[in-house]
């Protein structure tokens, strides 16, 4: 049974989401699916008031997570989500790993080493906005092991922040398969309150990840823009081919997941 405070928290978050939809999306859920959370950077209500701005840690995504998960995930409320809290938002499909940090419109520090084609760079620019949309955000438990969270470990090891690699390793750990990653296993233990209640099958279900749950790698060969060092020009053709395929696959997955998340939010409104 959920207490009155938790119920009030859900109602407040529902009202905040309704206000956002009216202010930014004309109460249109299709606009919501395409909404770039970077537009909230200077918004004290829906952005990151009094803290460093990060789309996956914005107030808006926290409101959404509360409505979606407060009756599923233990001890979840608006105040338990964020950096140094027990939960935090994460971004599923990486951008900087493949394309590098933004320099200016249609120019990114990584991809500029491989191509100057305007049509291709515009495609990346479009994806830059898509990767900040609802379907690319995930709630993860956030307790640390050896001073790293799951979010941080994802992005600082040999997986290079690619979600398909992470999900395969998470599955091994939760199913206790041979060859499981020891560090990730210890992170799971540190977040046992979550994972004792959310097994792998449930993790996929509640997070709308069915399309990601495959033994096949979605993003092979997992190129990262610094892989080829000062020989980048020698690998331009194959890197551009990979980048195109990465955008196409990630776009399809993000859009589909946005639709499912919005349908669930609508059913709870």
Image: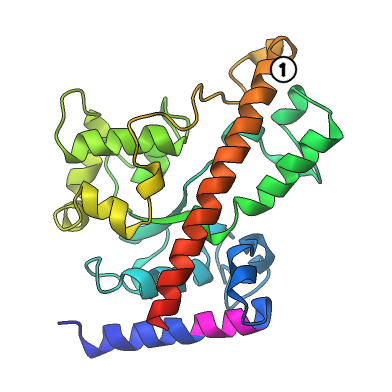
Q: Does the magenta stretch mainly form a helix, a strand or a loop?
A: helix
Q: Nearer the viewer, residue 224 or 127?
A: 127
**Left or right relative to 118: residue 215:** left
- Between 83 and 169, the one lying in front of the other is 169
Write down the quadrant of residue 121 in the picture.
Answer: top right
Q: Residues within 10 Å of mark 1 (few under 14, many from 20)?
A: some
Q: Does 127 sit above or below residue 269? A: above
* Above or below, 211 relative to 22: above
155 sits to left or right of 226: left
Looking at the image, which is closer to me, 253 or 37? 253
Magenta stretch: give its range: 16-22
Residue 19 part of the magenta-drawn span: yes
Tell me residue 15's x, y (percent): 48, 87
Residue 17, magenta (yes or no):
yes
Q: Residue at x 63, y 62 (%)?
A: 34
As displayed, is residue 175 above or below residue 71? above
Spot occupied by residue 57 in the image (x, y as percentages of width and height)? 49, 61
Residue 93: tell me if it is visible.
yes
Q: Which residue is at 37% across, 36% downward? A: 166
Residue at image point 65% right, 21% down? 239
Q: Check disc 1 and report its element: helix, strand or loop.
A: helix
In the picture of the structure, the residue carrying the numbered disc 1 is: 236
Above or below for 241 versus 172: above
Q: In the image, what residue occupies the spot 49% across and 24% down?
A: 220
């Amino acid at each position: 049974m959920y207490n009155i405070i938790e119920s009030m928290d859900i109602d407040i978050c529902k009202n905040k989401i309704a206000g956002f939809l009216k202010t930014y999306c004309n109460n249109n859920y299709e606009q919501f699916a395409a909404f770039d959370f970077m537009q909230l950077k200077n918004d004290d209500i829906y952005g990151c008031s009094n803290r460093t701005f990060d789309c996956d840690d914005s107030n808006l995504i926290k409101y959404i997570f509360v409505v979606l998960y407060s009756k599923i995930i233990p001890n979840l409320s608006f105040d338990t989500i964020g950096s140094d809290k027990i939960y935090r938002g994460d971004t599923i499909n990486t951008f900087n790993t493949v394309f590098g940090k933004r320099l200016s419109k249609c120019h990114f520090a990584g991809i500029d080493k491989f191509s100057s084609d305007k049509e291709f760079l515009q495609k990346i620019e479009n994806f830059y906005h898509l990767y900040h949309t609802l379907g690319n955000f995930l709630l993860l438990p956030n307790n640390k092991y050896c001073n790293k969270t799951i979010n941080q470990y994802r992005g600082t090891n040999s997986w290079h922040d690619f979600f398909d690699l992470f999900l395969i390793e998470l599955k091994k750990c939760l199913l206790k398969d041979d060859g499981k990653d020891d560090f990730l296993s210890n992170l799971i233990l540190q977040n046992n309150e979550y994972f004792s209640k959310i097994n792998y099958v449930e993790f996929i279900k509640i997070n709308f990840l069915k399309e990601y749950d495959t033994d096949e790698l979605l993003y092979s060969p997992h190129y990262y823009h610094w892989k080829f060092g000062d020989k980048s020009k020698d690998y331009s053709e194959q890197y551009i081919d990979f980048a195109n395929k990465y955008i196409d696959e990630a776009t399809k997955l993000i859009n589909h997941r946005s639709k499912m998340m919005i349908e669930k939010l609508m059913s709870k409104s």
